[in-house]
Amino acid sequence: MTAPTEPPRSPGKEKEPPKSDPGPVVEERPVIETAPETVPKARRGFWQTIEDQLAITPLVKEYLTPVEVNNFWYSLGGVLGISLFLEALTGVILALWYRPDAAVAYSITRDMLQAPVWSVIINFHYWNSFLIFGLVMVHMMRVFISGGYRRGKQGLWLVGVVLASLTFVVFMTGESLHWDEVGFAVPWHIGEFVEAIGLSDALNYAPQVLLNIPTATEKLNQIYTVHISIVPVLLIFFIVMHYFLVKVKGISLPFWMRESGRTAPFSRHIREWVIFGALAIGVVILFAIFLPREPGTAPQLLPSSPLFGSKDGPGDLGYKPTGPIGWTHGMNIFVASFGMEPDIWGTVIGMLVMLGALLIIPFVDPGPHEPETSKAAFNWRKRGWAFLAMAIFWIVLIGGVISNIVAAPG
């Protein structure tokens, strides 16, 4: 019996040693090749670059609004925004010359009114404030009549009330910066209020301290800071919030329009702002050029004033506020007729009543949708409390204005 023989080896191939345990086998995932990412070509042109970098397209061109809003009534809010921007711009220009120094503020204002170019700027700033006041009132009434605060939009109305209140503060502080006797009445009445609530010693603020130029300068600087810094910052914040809420919650159509379902880019609505804004601002420019104003009487704390040495306030001397805040003096006269002293309580009570009337409106007139007909819009049974609140607001405002106009000195 022969022994088994090994199988023949291949030439040049040695026997491999036994392999060690390679461990767990890791499965390799196949590499999936993808097409290279397509990079959009850079848009050319200056304005296209601005649109891309500031994301204007999604905010303006791709934001669609009902075509029915492209009309005069729905452009008032945009015109108001343009007017506020121009008011701020002219205010910045005026600040290049103006100085809140009680000794020279009146003479600076007088010199501006007599200088060829500066007179147009300061007069525009003055007359534009009347336009802003009118736009605020008309815009507010359009929203009120159409019930634009319904359908969960009470916050939108409340933000609008805050904007109207801040606008009033701008009017009041701006009147003071003229620093004639009428402007001097603003810190004087603030001093009366501080004194009435017992804080005159703590704040070193009373009417009589304003007859001293250094102290008056300190108070004028405070008013100047509120006018050019604090209130503008708050205005910008609430304007942005207002437009944001309109974009998120949608634009309400009034009962006199029927929704067609068609939309247009927001840029078209902005075009309406520009058209109607140009017309309104054009009228203001004509007023600024062809309706010159006098600087008024120098404030009583200046030796050059014919009122120098008087211990009475501007109201007692027959000087009344003008424009949008004229109702305040009228309310002071009203409460003084009932023996309420100091008469600044008239302004305080008037402001609280008007503010309260506006704040309560969206809560006494709720609803799942806006009035769809004129009959529903003027339904006294369902909207009676809202109309009463708005009537109170206008009674105080108009009554104060009339009282201010007809009032005798004192």
Image (tube, grey):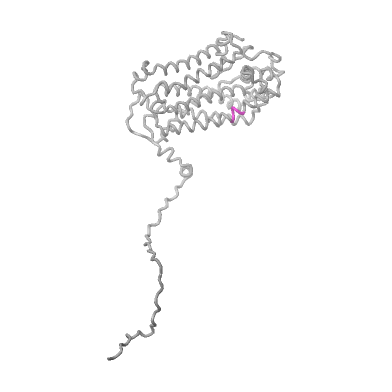
Rendered residue at 58%/21% (across/down): 292
Residue 89: x percent and y percent? Answer: 56, 31
Q: Nearer the viewer, residue 333 or 364?
A: 364
Q: Nearer the viewer, residue 359 or 281?
A: 359
The image quarter in which residue 119 lies: top right
Q: Nearer the viewer, residue 161 or 221?
A: 161
In the drawing, does residue 119 fall left or right of residue 8?
right
Range of the magenta residues? 225-229
The image quarter in which residue 227 lies: top right
Relative to 355, say whether 30 is above or below: below
Q: Main secondary structure of the magenta part?
A: helix
The image quarter in which residue 205 lies: top right
All told, the count of numbered labels is 0
Q: Determine if residue 231 is in view.
A: yes
Relative to 332, say whether 157 is above or below: below
Check residue 227 for magenta coloring: yes
The C terminus: image quadrant: top right
Residue 250: x percent and y percent? Answer: 39, 32
Relative to 76, say whether 20 is above or below: below
Residue 163: x percent and y percent? Answer: 50, 26
* Residue that lies at the very extreme toward the bottom in this rendered image: 1
The N terminus: image quadrant: bottom left
Rendered residue at 45%/34% (across/down): 244
In the drawing, does residue 350 fall left or right of residue 223?
left
Rendered residue at 37%/32% (across/down): 66
Q: Determine if residue 184 is in view.
A: no
Residue 93: x percent and y percent? Answer: 60, 31
In the drawing, does residue 211 fall left or right of residue 117?
right
* Residue that lies at the very extreme toward the front in this rendered image: 1
Q: Nearer the viewer, residue 20 or 9?
A: 20
Check residue 160 for magenta coloring: no
* Residue that lies at the very extreme toward the left in this rendered image: 1
